[in-house]
Image: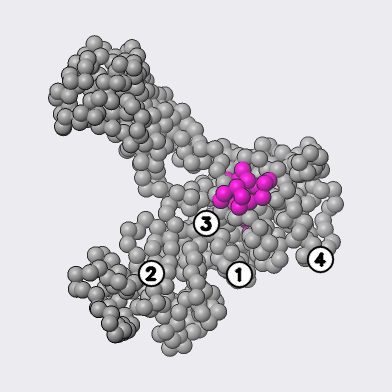
Amino acid sequence: MTASQLSRGFALQPRPSNRVGNFLDTGPIQKPSRRQLHRLQLALEQGEQRWLWGASQCQPHPRLFCQRNKQSCLVSASSAPSAQVDSLALESDILTALRRIIDPDLGKDVVDCGFVRDLRIDHQAGGVDFTLRLTTPACPVKDDFRKKAEQYVGEIGWVKRVGVKMDADPPQPLTPEDGRSQGLSKVAHIIAVSSCKGGVGKSTTAVNLAYTLAQMGAKVGIFDADVYGPSLPTMVSPELRVLKMNPETRSIEPLVYEGVKAVSFGFAGQGSAIMRGPMVSGVVQQLLTTTEWGELDYLVVDFPPGTGDIQLTLCQTVAFSAAVIVTTPQKLAFLDVAKGIRMFARLAVPCVAVVENMAYFDADGKRYHPFGKGSGERIVRDFGLPNLCRFPIEADLSAAGDGGRPLVVSNPTSATANAFMDLGAAVVREVAKLSMVGKASARYVEDCHAIAVKLPEQPLELYLDPAVVRRNDTSAKSVNEWTGEKILQDSDIADSVRPAAMRPLGNYAMQIDWEDGFNQVAPFEQLEGLPHLSSQDLSSRQRPSISAPNGVQPAADNEPPQNATQRLMAAASRR
């Protein structure tokens, strides 16, 4: 077949790549250019094997290969019938079926998310094989994805067999390798588990969360950052109970128990430490950063209680992906947890879940709340945290920790283990959203005295009055923690109040530092619910323009806006 034959009746369009042979049959749209025909003729003369033939005159080559976005499709030509099979139509049938599978967290189908890889089609035998490569091996809906993929593709008329391989991207650090120490360079996500108050079950939560993530298929490590009272040596039972240093790399080799890497000062053979704070911070930093963790999907860090030197050093040493807050229903615990959330907010660590430990117990067919209730809901409400998980008072949970075998390992089918599975799924879900969803941003527009906020997945910015944002603060300085009554009245905050700095806290809140030294954490949901400034509002707030100097001609009426306020007004008018 010659290039002139190809020019009759259908078009060949080049792929984004400049490689010869990357043309697609797109039907009778337009004739190819002379240059395209020349390149095609050269490819035919050179025996080019990678083509998609769509016209009846074309004979298929031994292998027909197409690359589309992040998916690859391989169609076996030897199994094609004598009548030409449109490989694009076959691929389209499969991808259309797979588009029915929606990622519940990202809100997109698996095709648009780029999860479909290595698509192979054997039309004559009715076989379809492909890979679903997810962002993490601990994806809580991976089994559901597999079942739906097999079902939806199997419903296609010519398909008789469906082979689905589940895979996950290898761990990729959230920050560049040079942003973390060598030992942490291959760790994808570091999760902080903190309570800011002792005795609420933080270490129990951290250990069981780590082993839950491992059961979900992830590569996991756990680091016990409590030097004064390390808990990890009691809660896990590795065969080797003393850390060793690699003499060549001078790095610490972590212990391994039930597939999870573990490091604690308690494994250093020193017991608990008796030393001053600055020295403890140095020990914790050295243990964390000089350990050769290798490739990990998640590293769970069990924070010591409080909001002091150790916590600040940890957050300033490495980039934490997220934090899980542990509390109890008591109001006293709530007050300390609120301080911890604000500490993470100041250090730009997003909190993704709240664990309310010892929330209740069941007896005689009734549920009792010995420590009260409502603290967890208030944390979620006041700080905009997306997940709340409650755990009961259970003797088996405590006994498992004391026995050196976490409950999710010793009794993985128990109700409490299922609750930890829900917590693990929430952490995986929120971390994936933080990694893939566009980040929020905010800026102060001085010439119209407005805060412009760009929320995740929102096409346009929102414009807010700084005084309105400040007056809606819900912290203890503005609202009574016990009664909910406002401490600062609207009249106490000047209309001219200005933010000094703003930065997003993951995808759930914005931290605002005001010029008077006040720190505010404003959830995105709250910002979205505040009154927005319209284009007319922005126009009325515009500061008077400065007269042009002598000899300078004013801008013509048809020229584009020259200042930030005019650009904001134009954008706001399009909403």
Residue 71 visible from this viewpoint: yes
Q: Quadrant of the C terminus?
A: bottom left
Give me the residue at 55% from left, 79% from top: 517
Would you name the residue on which mark 3 appears? Answer: 352
Q: Which mark is residue 562?
A: none
Query: Based on the displayed image, in which of its 4 quarters is residue 313 positioned?
Result: bottom right
Residue indicated by mark 2: 452
**Percent coordinates x, y for residue 4 in the rendering:** 18, 20
Residue type, numbered disc 3: Val
Marks 1/4: CA–CA distance: 23 Å
What is the secondary structure assignment of the residue under circle 3?
strand
Q: Nearer the viewer, residue 321 or 214?
A: 321
Residue 276 marker? 4
Question: What whole-number distance in Å separates the C-alpha atoms at marks 4 and 3?
Answer: 32 Å
For this rendering, which residue is in front, 452 or 265? Answer: 452
SS type, badge 1:
helix
Which secondary structure lies at badge 2?
strand
Mark found first going from the N terminus, 2 or 1: 1
Determine crowd level at label 3: few under 14, some 14-19, many 20+ residues with C-alpha closer than 10 A. Answer: many
- Kind of residue indicated by mark 2: Ala
Residue 481, picture quadrant = bottom right
Mark with earlier residue (2, 3):
3
Vertical side of 560 occupied by 367: above or below: above
In the displayed structure image, the side of residue 376 where residue 237 appears, left or right:
right
Tell me which corner region of the image, top left, top right, bottom left or bottom right, holds residue 229. bottom right
Which of marks 3 and 4 precedes in the sequence?
Answer: 4
Which comes before the other along the chain, label 1 or label 4?
4
Point out the stretch of residues depicted in magenta: 175-194
Disc sitting over residue 339 in the figure? 1
